[in-house]
Structures are given as structure tokens and as C-alpha cells.
Image (spheres, rainbow, N blue to C red):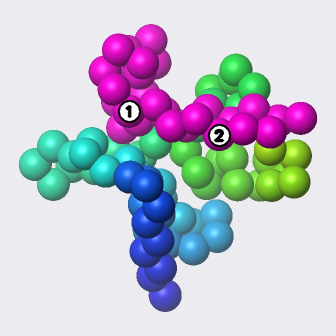
Amino acid sequence: RVSIRSNRGVYISGIDEFANVFIKGFTIKNFQKEVLFILDGLQVGNYSKIVNIVNPSDIKSITVLKNASDIAIYGFVGSGGVIIIKTK
């Protein structure tokens, strides 16, 4: 079963911990790079790594970084975009 959901430039393909998160506009000739998740300042990795770490009720804020100057400090790892999650 494949589920595709989209919200304000971010789309999710798949379900549960097997989902992949992408930011629209970050594709290069059919190459899609997953989003890098930052949790309270620490690089966690992709969605499958963060989904079981964070309790949604503990989330204080979510910021989506899309422009080159914002994601440059994350190098290639962040080249698919970066989502910063801050907890309470």
C-alpha cells in the first residue's frame, strides 16, 4: 500500500516508518533526495529514523528550510531540504 500526502510544498510517500518525505522543487532529473531532519539541533537523518523518536505531542515547532543559503551548512546531506523540529 502506498500513500501520498502533500502539504504546503512537502509531500510524503509511503506509510508509517516506511514513508519518505520530500520537499517540492528538490528534484534533479528524476532524482529525489529525502529531507534531512534536525531534532533540537542534532542531525537525525530521514523520516524513518525520526518517526519513532519524537512524540507528536512533544513538538513545539517545525521549520522547513528550502533555500540554498539556509541549507548550505548541512552540505550534501541537507541538499534535499531540511526540516527542523524543536521539542518542548
Q: Is residue 37 visible?
A: yes
Answer with left or right where residue 28 lies relative to residue 85: left
| Image point (44%, 66%), residue name | 6
Q: Label 1 crowding class (10 Å Cα cut-off): few <14, some 14-19, many 20+?
A: many
Q: Secondary structure at mark 1?
A: loop
In the image, what residue type sits under mark 2? Ile
**Whole-Å distance between the Cαs marked 2 and 1?**
13 Å
- Tell me the residue that label 1 is attached to: 66
Placement of 83 over or under 31, stated as above or below: above
Q: Position of residue 86 (x, y in %)?
A: 75, 32
Q: Position of residue 12 (x, y in %)?
A: 47, 63
What's the magenta region?
A: 60-88
- Cβ atoms at labels 2 and 1 below 8 Å apart: no
**Viewer-closest of 2 and 59:** 59
Q: Position of residue 18 (x, y in %)?
A: 56, 66
| Image point (44%, 12%), residue name | 73
**Viewer-closest of 27 and 1:** 27
- Tell me the residue that label 2 is attached to: 62
